[in-house]
Amino acid sequence: MEEKKKSAVSWVLTWAGQKKSSYVWSVILAVINVVFKIVPYFIIADVVRMFLDGDKDLREYMVKALIIAGSFILAELCHSVSTACSHKATFTVLANIRKSCCDKLARVPLGYVKDTPSGSFKNIMVERIDSIETTLAHVVPEFTSNLLAPIIVIVYFFMVDWRLALFSFIPIVVGFATYMGMMIDFQENYNRTVEKTKALNDAAVEYIDGIEVIKAFGKTESSYAKFTKAAKENADSYINWMKKCSFFQAAMFVITPYTLATVLPIGARYVSNGSLTTADFVVCIILSLGIVGPLLTIGSYTDDLGKLSTVIGEVTGILEQPELVRPERTKAQPKDNGIKVTDITFGYHDKEILHGVSMDIKAGTVNAIVGPSGSGKSTIAKLIASLWDVNSGSIEIGGVDIKDIALADFNDRLAYVSQDNYLFNETVRNNIRQGRPDATDAEVEEVARKSGCYDFIMNLENGFDTVVGGAGGHLSGGERQRISIARAMLKDAPIVILDEATAYTYPENEAILQSSIAKLVAGKTLIVIAHRLSTIKDADQIFVVNAGNVEAHGTHEELLSKCTLYRDMWQAHISVKDTAGDEKEGE
């Protein structure tokens, strides 16, 4: 049987956690607030009757005035505390939503994250979640009070004169029926504007991230046109929607308040024929005015509730993504750090990239994966690093399938250095410390020396406390590489994967980086994805990958003799090195 989906309310209460009681208290106080708000209506009705009956007891009038004043004060106090309680719970909800999203993204396959524009994640996790703060914080107390207050007033209205109470409903029903015309395609229009806003965010992020390329290739006009088109479509979406809504909203706000249009003439007739007292007529007029305001306020929450439902739908769209299949606890401990890849296939978007790849990597050995661009080298590395799950086949560490190893245990066992060398907008020290958060400053500085980045770090403005900028943008590519290696070195994992980690290294820095890598991988199981074959020719084993298959494997000398593709790649590499050397000599 298909599992029933959780409602938006259920999700909110789940995220509220221990602060769920704050929402409960918010509702209780909102109800008490309504009681205090209603008291003046009863008192005023009594005052009107006293006045029309000729009662001139000033002391009695003063007491009733004080009761009304006290009711207003207590109502406002209850409202303030109720709102404070709902805000307390709401900020817990928002924090837990963001935490849940971050936790989820750490457990889903990398392909989902890569395929989703970063602007979409930013939009959902920042702007969209922020947009429901007012709804969550105010709807609970205010919706409760604005719904309960008119109900109590209506009940009292029926007790005074049921006929006028019924007639007072005519403009209310007509007004809200008109308003419902706006709700026919409300969700469809709202979702459309949300999609246009996402497209605008994606276009903005793409424009900013690619500004260097845009300027370099003179694409400012075309790229800016893409952004302005997204901005115009977003604006047009909202404008068209508001045009549709404006008539219905205006009609509701014009028609609904006119309860007096029925209560006054019909009530006057009842007074004239003696079926209604003057005192009760005045009370009915007051009560008819007390119904509409709260109901109009409830109507104004329609947009907020629609937004809440949509945003929670977007968030649960992330939370319901399939995760990497991993147990909470490791089922069996690997006997060593050897890696065995058995007949794995993998693909995404209905396209298979790897076709039955097998590898046997001994513990403590150096292994290289080489091949033409797009052959699947980095994909194999990412699968071994558990960034994706294989479609079929298996990957084992020390005889244990990685799907049987808890993610935390697996991460402790492996260090992955990619060609992207991503750094956080933090200090150099904290970026290196990502490898082992409990490392001391002395340990951080020691690995900086071993990785060959200590000297350039000390030459930075604030040394290890220099903030590197978004994605490490204040540092050169080579500097980011060395800090990434220092980070991996600090982690001291027994398995190291270098996914073209030296791809952007200048020749003059390559010797420094190779020395750093040698210290990093000493005695460990190493897998290196390389395009410079000279850096891996001494590897214990080299795998040649072509078009998603392992074409051959062996040592450098063995592959030169038996693998045409490897031999051609080596010759091309040597030719490039010779050409570069000749050019350098001619300078």
Image (spheres, helix red, strand yellow):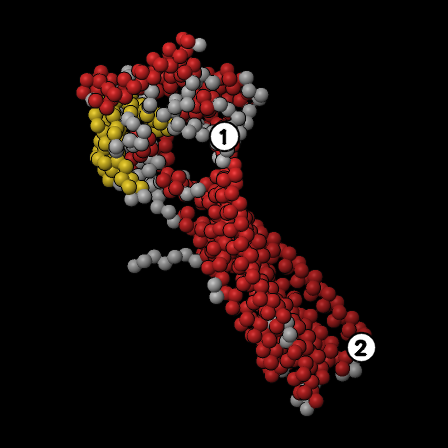
Residue that appears at 36% across and 40% down: 111
Q: Which residue is mark 1?
A: 216
Amino acid type of the residue tagged 2 in the rendering: Asp
First of labels 1, 2 by sequence position: 2
Q: Which residue is mark 2?
A: 57
Residue that appears at 53% across and 72% down: 177
Residue 85 sits above or below residue 167 on the image: above
Q: Secondary structure at mark 1?
A: helix
Residue lying furthest left: 562
Residue 411 pos. (x, y %): 36, 32
Q: Is residue 247 left or right of residue 54?
A: left
Number of residues whose C-alpha sits closer than 10 Å to that of mark 2, classed few (under 14), some (14–19) or many (20 or more) = few
Residue lying furthest bottom: 273
Residue 371 pos. (x, y %): 28, 26
From where the camera sits, is residue 522 visible?
A: no
Residue 4 sits above or below residue 217 on the image: below
